[in-house]
Image: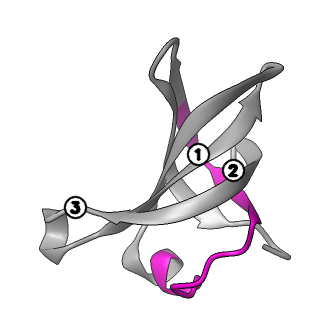
Amino acid sequence: MPSASFEIRNPRWLATGANGGRRYLAARCTFKGDDVSVYVFFKDSAEELKLTARLPATLGVECTRYDHIDGIGLTLLDCGVAEGG
């Protein structure tokens, strides 16, 4: 069960070399009233594949864990695409 849902804006794909090459998103979102950078790490590659290379301007994501560091941004872990995107 997700612990939090977020609507992210202007997402873009980034990639790591971990696990044979995993993709994640960098975007913006509102967190506690502030506009912050957000990094979205999916729970598995199947979740990554739910999204196409061309991302929507806004996207709903659900995560089981998240961490916020002032000046750095918000990291969302174990994410899935929210129903309805």
| Colouring used for the render | one colour
Label 2 – label 3 distance at C-alpha: 24 Å
Q: How many residues crowd around disc 3 within 10 Å: few (fewer than 14), some, or many (20 or more)?
A: few
Residue bearing mark 2:
2
Q: The residue under label 3 is which amino acid type?
A: Thr
Question: Label 1: which residue?
Answer: 64
Label 1 neighbourhood size at 10 Å, few (<14), some (14-19), many (20+)? some
Work out whether mark 2 precedes mark 1 in sequence or the reverse, and give the earlier one: 2
Q: Secondary structure at mark 2?
A: loop
> 34 above or below 44?
above
Q: Is residue 57 positioned above or below 76 on the image?
A: below
The answer to whether the residue labelled 2 contacts the one labelled 1, judged by CB atoms less than 8 Å apart, is: yes
Magenta residues, start to end: 48-66
Return the x and y of residue 48 as percentages of the image width and height.
47, 77
Residue 26 x %, y %: 49, 52
Tell whether position 61 is magenta: yes
Q: Name which of mark 2 and mark 3 comes first in the sequence.
A: 2
The percent position of residue 37, horizontal first and vertical second, equals 56, 35
Please tell me which residue lies in front, 78 or 60.
60
The correct choice, above or below, for 52 with respect to 27 in the image is below
Q: Is residue 15 left or right of residue 29?
A: left
Q: Distance from label 2 to label 1 (Cα)?
A: 5 Å
| Dot label at residue 16 | 3
